[in-house]
């Protein structure tokens, strides 16, 4: 199942509401980079409110997408990471320090605007 | 007292998701809270992926352990793959042969209450247990 990517002005908005398997995570990575390329978006918010499990593989795919988008000139912010997901990732030993995050979609858009203005 | 709950074969990539969903449902049924459910589901995901990546096929088995005052969920990941040559190495943080994040088994051990691994050239069995909090 493809994850919908919505365009709002210069931003792309994604809400992941499906159980991510390795394949769909990889497809999403590719889809998002193509969409950034085609739309000329400068910022992306990926909302993870509905995601209940992030294991090491999915974390790597999501972390990589930040670096990949960055290479293309777009900033990615993750929002809505669940308390249980956050605790599990740290205990698992995955810190994702380079990944910009915000509490919710609203904060995510504010953070994105700030980051883009700093450039 | 042990009671076998179910067994999930790991043959294709999607089975990783199937196994962790099954595990999460058992965890919920047994009365684990949402954080423990996430820990259990994530641990299963790591174990199932190891099977899929290194042994191709295997199975994840779920058992209920009735003890006083806690209930345990015992998860056994079993495969007939080539086995792990140096178990002590893979139990170190950051070690990875697959180019992943290397969270793997040490991470699984931290997420669960009990952890055991036996690996020979005839296969690997990883057993983990999580107890409900009193």
Image: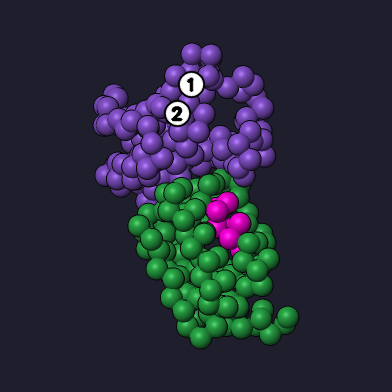
Q: Position of residue B114 (x, y in %)?
A: 48, 31
Q: Residues within 10 Å of mark 1 (few under 14, many from 20)?
A: many
| Disc marking residue B56 | 2
Name the chain letter of the residue that bears numbered label 2: B
- Residue A60 part of the magenta segment: yes
Quadrant where the N terminus of chain A lies?
A: bottom left
Distance from disc 2 to disc 1, alpha carbons, whole Å, reads 7 Å
Q: Earlier in the sequence, mark 2 or mark 1?
A: 2
Q: Are marks 2 and 1 in contact (CB under 8 Å)?
A: yes
Q: Which residue is mark 1?
A: B81
Q: Residue at position x 54%, y 46% from top?
A: A56
The stretch in magenta equals A59-66
Q: Quadrant of residue B21?
A: top left
Name the chain letter of the residue that bears numbered label 1: B
Q: Main secondary structure of the magenta part?
A: helix
> In the figure, A25 relative to B70: above or below?
below
User: Colour in which chain B is shown?
Assistant: purple
């Amino acid at each position: 199942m493809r994850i919908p990517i919505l365009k709002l002005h210069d931003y792309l908005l994604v809400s992941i509401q499906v159980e991510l398997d390795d394949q769909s995570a990889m497809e999403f990575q590719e889809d998002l980079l193509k969409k950034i390329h085609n739309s000329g978006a400068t910022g992306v918010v990926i909302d993870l409110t509905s995601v209940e499990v992030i294991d090491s593989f999915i974390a790597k795919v999501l972390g990589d997408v930040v670096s990949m988008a960055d290479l293309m000139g777009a900033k990615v912010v993750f929002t809505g990471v669940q308390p249980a997901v956050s605790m599990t990732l740290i205990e698992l030993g995955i810190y994702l320090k380079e990944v910009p995050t915000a509490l919710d979609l609203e904060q995510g858009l504010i953070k994105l605007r700030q980051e883009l203005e700093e450039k | 007292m042990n009671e076998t709950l179910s067994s999930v074969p790991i043959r294709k990539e999607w089975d990783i998701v199937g196994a962790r969903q099954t595990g999460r449902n058992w965890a919920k049924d047994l009365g684990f809270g949402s954080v423990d459910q996430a820990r259990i589901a994530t641990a299963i995901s790591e174990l199932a992926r190891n099977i899929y990546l290194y042994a191709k096929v295997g199975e994840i088995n779920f058992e209920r352990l009735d003890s006083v005052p806690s209930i345990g969920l015992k998860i056994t990941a079993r495969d007939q793959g080539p086995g792990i040559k140096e178990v002590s190495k893979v139990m170190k943080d950051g070690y990875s042969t697959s180019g992943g994040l290397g969270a793997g088994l040490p991470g699984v051990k931290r997420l669960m209450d009990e952890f055991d691994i036996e690996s020979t050239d005839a296969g690997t069995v990883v057993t983990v247990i999580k107890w409900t909090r009193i």
